[in-house]
Image (cartoon, coloured by chain):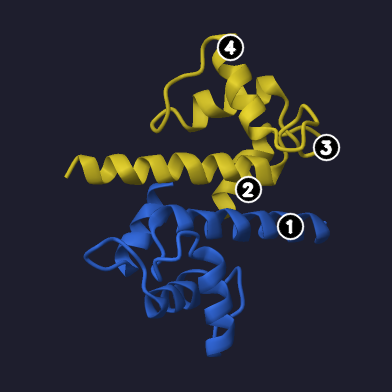
Chain colours: A blue, B yellow
Amino acid sequence: MVNIIRVFHSYSGENCKLKKKDLKELINSQMSSFVKQVQDTHTLDVIFSDLDANYDREIDFSEFAALVAMVTSACHVSFHEMQ
Amino acid sequence: MVNIIRVFHSYSGENCKLKKKDLKELINSQMSSFVKQVQDTHTLDVIFSDLDANYDREIDFSEFAALVAMVTSACHVSFHEMQ
């Protein structure tokens, strides 16, 4: 859990939130073994708007934690599919 | 993320779900640096029913991932309060 906070802080700005470019960098560098690289703007826009629950055009930590929960759950499903 | 799956699997039964006693053991041994020990039955019942989104009286991985997201978010808040 501490690692999740640490990773978030290494990409979030002064106000402890992720802008779109921060989210893209974080996903592509920290989550690449779990999710495909985010290349095109449309994919990023969809992910971003899905996560931005309060519509403030930034991703705060609890919104990011929801992404981690979703990706981890997806990993868990594929873990069992591989068995 | 892989650690979260690994921890879950070390407490979940054959059907890959946590019973109430499994959840208590997991929280008390794996999350003790983040949350208070769960001692009394009432507290455990409240946590369990909060997590058991599909009311099947067991905690599956996505329900557990929601707990991890909540606890991590709470840690993030207290991280900033300490600064």
Inspect the image, locate mark 3, and give the three-letter code of the amino acid beneath it. Asn
Residue extending farthest to the bottom is: A40
Task: List the residue tagged with mark 4.
Answer: B42
Cα–Cα gap, marks 3 and 2 = 14 Å
Query: Mark 1 belongs to which subunit?
Result: A
Dot 4: what SS? helix
- For disc 2, the marked residue is B5
Please give the chain letter of the residue carrying mark 3.
Answer: B
Q: Quadrant of residue B13?
A: top right
Q: Position of residue B28 (x, y in %)?
A: 51, 23
Residue where numbered disc 1 is placed: A79
Q: Give amino acid for label 1.
A: Phe
Residue under the point 76% across and 37% down = B54
Q: Nearer the viewer, residue B4 or A50?
A: A50
- Marks 1 and 3 close (CB-CB < 8 Å): no
Q: Both on one chain, marks 4 and 3?
A: yes
Dot 2 and dot 4 within a common chain: yes
Task: Tell me the SS state at disc 2.
Answer: helix
What secondary structure is found at the residue carrying circle 3?
Answer: loop
Residue at 32% from the left image edge and 43% from the top image edge = B77
- In front of the other: label 1 or label 4? 4
Which quadrant of the structure image shows residue A40? bottom right
Which residue corresponds to the image point at 60% horizontal and 68% vertical from the top-left? A34
